Image: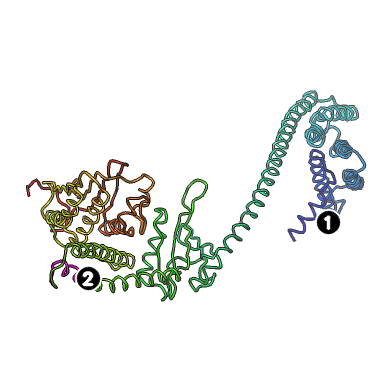
Amino acid sequence: MKNRLSILFNRLTDVPTDFPDNARRQKILNILIVSIFFLTALAIILILALQNLVSLGLQGNEFYLAFVVLIGLAIVYFINRSKHLPSWLASFLFLVFLSAAFAYTDTPEQLANGRSLFVFTIPVIMSSMLLVPAASFLFAGLVTVELIIISNVSSVVPNGFAIGGFFLVAVVTWLSARSLEQAIKDLRVVNAELDQRVVERTSELATALSRETVEAGRREAILNSIADGVIVFDRTGTAILSNPSITNLVNKSQTEIIGKGLSDLLDSEDVKASDRVSLAALLEKSAQNLSNLRVKWGRKTLSVNAAEVRDGASQAIGTVAVFRDFTREAELEQMKNTFIAIVSHELRTPLNAILGYAEMLKEAVYGQINEKQKSVSGRIMTNTQRLLGIVSDLLDQAQIEAGKLKIQMIPCKPAELLDNIHGVMEKTASDKNLSLILKLDPAMDTTIIGDPQRLQQIMVNLTNNAVKFTDSGSVQVKVAPVGTKNWQIQTIDTGNGIPQDALEYIFETFRQVDGMSTRQHGGVGLGLSIVKQLVELMNGKITVESEIGKGSTFTVTLPLITHNGSPTVPSTKQE
């Protein structure tokens, strides 16, 4: 009921105009007209309901005046709602009608100089709201004329102070209305500017949204066409986006992925517990650009990469994980490693037999041989030993790639390692007229913890490589502590040197430096690769510095661990 009355009142007071100032004034006028009309009508109804006009002291002409007021208000109301008449006409007629009606509200004496004198200020005040601000002076003059007429009729001297008060009220209302009009105009200008800004911003947003929609469509098309599985996680680790390919790789539907955390994704019997831990670590440390991770997912082998997603302010907002089906490659790699291991193992037996028989022939076990036969036997032994070295390298490489090569941490002596190098490489170096110089820093501990077999292999490979590519001069092997936590193995030669562009790939598997000397000395490009992988298995690093024509320096840096398993301060004892 309340809402219906509110709707009815709004309909009665609305005006059909598009001019904001006129609409404001005409709406105020309609509110006044409707309010006065209903109050007057209600008063008439209440009085008639008492049915005792004489006792109330009311006369019939007063009712006629009330009906005239109602009729006048109705006429002004329809004029105010008319689209064909000036907007100011209804307001002017209303104020004139109101001023005239006040002349009948009391006796002439009271109106001219008594209790009802104040009513004439009402048209003066209302005129500045219903008409222009200066209209208050016009109606101050009109009510002054009306007051003078009433004073003459009642033979009363006009109240000069009251007339002055009318014009004072006119000044105040004029100033107030003028300030209000200016404030409304300023507000309208501000609103227009805001509307223009809203239109511009809306247009810009619509353009940006359209552009983003197109880009989003392109990204979605690209994402859906990728054969690899892709999952995007937010900062809380919840999956917010994925492509269709991931469902085939992990055997989960989109509903089982989107909105779920990494733990839910990995909650499967197809994934081993160790792989779950590794995957979680990879995604948590995606900002560190870690290498890809291979995990077993049921019968499949997946290669997983992760990268951080950043916004325009370079703030991390999530992680993207890419899953690639590596099953076929893993199977081929396993087949290759198995084949190399089997073939290498099977080659060792006949090669050792050949080496043994050649040595027996050379030592004349089966009878005396001439010098030519002895030379041939020596060549057989040399090439067989080379083949055995290649086979050993292939076996080591296969073990490393299969993850089966283990480092044994046991006590070993650096001095013994150098002595063994001397025994193995001295003859090879002297055959080329090279000086083999072995140096042990006095500050080096006599006993350290490490894998003596693999340390010996590293030193032999580096020294053999240096001797192989050095035609004159010397090869130095140095062992020394570095600070309190590390120690180094250095091989320094005066050989041909390595080109700068080759330093980038010299430690790669089956890679060799292009050149005549490399082809002359043979090899399959595994020596330095195995050295690097062994060093990394020992939590160390290897570096190389080289200059063409001056030689090369290979430096292996390893953690220094003593017999009690802790780093030591280098000692000063002599060996």
21 left or right of 206?
right
Which quadrant of the figure has residue 399?
bottom left
- Residue type highlighted by circle 2: Asn
Tell me residue 364's x, y (percent): 13, 69
Q: Which residue is mark 1?
A: 50
Say if 167 sits above or below 410 in the image: above
Say if 68 sits above or below 454 in the image: above
Residue 437: in magenta span: no
Q: Do tag 1 and tag 2 residues touch (Cβ < 8 Å)?
A: no
Nearest to the observer: residue 310 or residue 323:
323
Residue 357: in magenta span: yes
Tell me residue 69's x, y (percent): 88, 45
Magenta-highlighted stretch: main secondary structure? helix
386 left or right of 253?
left
Question: In this picture, which residue range is highlighted in magenta?
Answer: 355-365
Q: Crowding at label 2, few (<14), some or many (≥20) Cα neighbours within 10 Å?
A: some
Say if 375 sits above or below 360 in the image: above
Residue visible at 54% across and 62% down? 241
Q: Indicate which disc residue 352 carries.
A: 2
Residue visible at 93% across and 42% down? 84
Q: Indicate which disc residue 340 carries.
A: none
Query: Can the viewer see residue 157 in this picture?
Result: yes
Which quadrant of the figure has residue 409?
bottom left
N-terminal of the pair, mark 1 or mark 2, is 1
**Which SS class for mark 2?**
helix
**Which SS class for mark 1?**
helix
Q: Crowding at label 1, few (<14), some or many (≥20) Cα neighbours within 10 Å?
A: few
- Residue type highlighted by circle 1: Leu
Say if 294 sits above or below 486 in the image: below
Tell me residue 64's x, y (percent): 92, 47
> What distance separates the C-alpha of mark 1 from that of mark 2?
138 Å
Nearest to the observer: residue 347 or residue 553:
347
